[in-house]
Amino acid sequence: MTSGSVWSFPKVVFFLAGGASPLVAGVLLAALKGGRPRLADMGLRLIDIRRISVRWLAVILLFWLIFDVVMAGAALLIGITDHPLEIASDVFSSPRTLGFMLVVSFVFPAVEEVGLRGYWLDELQKRFQPAVAGLINGATWALWHTPFVWFPGYYANTSFNPELWWWLPSIVLHTLLIVCVYNGTNRSILAALLFHGMMNLTGELLGLAPEVFPFMLIGNFLAVLVFVWSTRPMRRGWVR
């Protein structure tokens, strides 16, 4: 990485400190509002696999693979690109690249999901219906992500090169999908984390072409209509 990269020292220290803000804020606010019982509840929801049924586990593991392949095929059919996929088979021969991909795919989402869903989404759903809570939660998440496009080198080892005009609304739509998974698994932070992580990992392993990502905004919108609005967790939320 270059000396100007966000991953270079000391920039990476400030980046990681700021990147931990959802986790830190979520844990501190949960402690202030609910003390040790609420922190223990958050911890349990982060590790309790029993909340995730076989049906929801299948959704978590397969949804993004199916979605990405369908969108890549559609992009090919309508002429957006001649090469929508470039499967990253060589990533397994490079431990450094594979490690970076796994960290970005799962460790960083863990930091985000604990605070944004494990705390903030719960608070929102006490006041609003799931769809409204998801929109507010997603807008918060999108705003938090906005500076990432100006961090030099952040996406250097990935095929992802976001532009705000399609990335920010995509984040809001992704949040609505995450809310559905979260509510459907009895507020499992682990389920939200895995669903988020599989979104990241699948896109990288399939090697989606840069031209496909803006087009996927349409697919995300259609997925929300079909996947979210037709499911009970989005209509009823979670039982308090």
Image: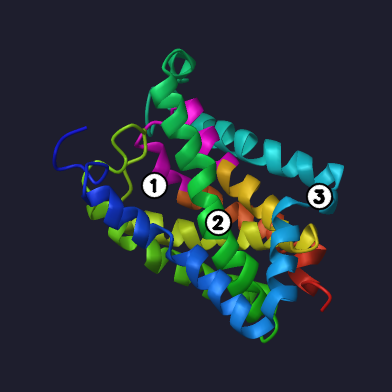
Q: Position of residue 12 (x, y in %)?
A: 28, 48
The residue indicated by pointer 2 is: 174
Give the x, y percent position of residue 120.
58, 74
Q: Which residues are magenta?
A: 198-216
Give the number of the disc on residue 52.
Answer: 3
Closest to the observer: 151 or 23?
23
Between discs 3 and 2, the one toward the N terminus:
3
Above or below for 121 versus 76: below
Q: Are marks 1 and 2 in contact (CB under 8 Å)?
A: no
**Marks 3 & 1, CB-CB < 8 Å contact:** no
At a point 52% along the width and 45% down the height, the residue shown is 107
Q: Residues within 10 Å of mark 1 (few under 14, many from 20)?
A: some
Three-letter residue code for mark 1: Pro
- What is the secondary structure assignment of the residue under circle 1? helix
Q: Quadrant of residue 150?
A: bottom left
Image point (55%, 66%), residue name: 115
At x 21%, y 49%, the residue is 10
- Would residue 188 be visible to someone looking at this image? no
Disc 2 is placed on an element classified as: helix
Percent of width and height locating residue 157: 33, 31
Residue 104: image quadrant is: top left
Task: Look at discs 1 and 2 and give the one toward the viewer.
Answer: 2
Q: Is residue 110 above or below residue 141?
A: above
Q: Quadrant of residue 124?
A: bottom right
Q: Which residue is mark 1?
A: 214
Q: Which quarter of the rendering shows the N terminus?
A: top left
